[in-house]
Image (spheres, rainbow, N blue to C red):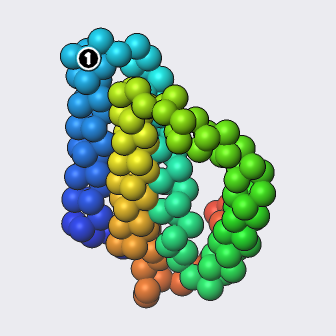
Amino acid sequence: MVTSTKSISGIISGGVLVLVVLCVAWRAHVELSLPGTWLTVLVGLSGIALGWLLGFLASPYGPEEDTRFAKYASLISLFLSGYALAKIDPVVNKVLSGTLTEVSYGLRFAVFFICMVVSAITMYVFRLYTGRPDPGVAQTACRPPNQVS
């Protein structure tokens, strides 16, 4: 495996930034007496998971992964264009009618979005600078070691 200080610093800075965002969200809940602190943390963790997936799919290692990831991307876009688009219509109606104007909703959206973007960038940088096979080492499929009698 090829390792780089860029990948290590990217992972550390991404992790620190996500922790800072979650701490700020925690303090906002305390200061504003907002209910649902753990729900906001869960929303942040969901953003991290989605960002990790997006960063992973955005950085294939080779042509084989590129082909597989293109299939995954087409399945995800099919899902988003159909089912998810139909389910988001009631949410858009509530936002436009002013129902979702509470501070906690805006806070949760910001936490989700920031965590998703930071984790996507972190995963992309990690896969870009770390985890690639060494160019001089022959790659083989995982097999059990030869047993010596």
Q: Position of residue 138 (x, y in %)?
A: 54, 84
Residue 17: % across, % down: 25, 45
The residue wearing badge 1 is 32
Graded by Cα atoms within 10 Å as few (under 14), some (14 to 19) or many (20 or more), the crowding at tag 1 reads few
Residue at 53% x, 50% y is 50
Eyeballing the image, is 67 above or below 43?
below
Q: Is residue 74 left or right of residue 27?
A: right
- The residue at 63%/75% (across/down) is 65
135 relative position to 90: left or right: left
Residue 13 horizontal/vertical position (percent)? 23, 52
Frontmost residue, 110 versus 96: 96
User: From the viewer's perspective, is 16 left or right of 54?
Assistant: left
Pick whichever, 31 or 147, lies toward us. 31
Please provide percent x and percent y for residue 45: 46, 37
Q: Quadrant of the N terminus?
A: bottom left
Rendered view: 110 above or below 31: below
Number of labels in the image equals 1
**For residue 144, which quarter of the picture?**
bottom right
Can the viewer see residue 147? no
In this picture, residue 56 sits left or right of residue 20: right
Position of 110 relative to 145 (above/below):
above
For the C terminus, give its image quadrant. bottom right
Asked which secondary structure carries label 1, the reply is helix
Q: Amino acid at mark 1?
A: Leu
At horizontal 53% and vertical 42% (from top left) the residue drawn is 96
Tell me where residue 72 sits by quadrant: bottom right
As drawn, 76 above or below 32: below
Give the camera-side residue of 145 and 47. Answer: 47
Residue positioned 78% across, 57% down in the render: 82
**Residue lying furthest front in this view?**
97
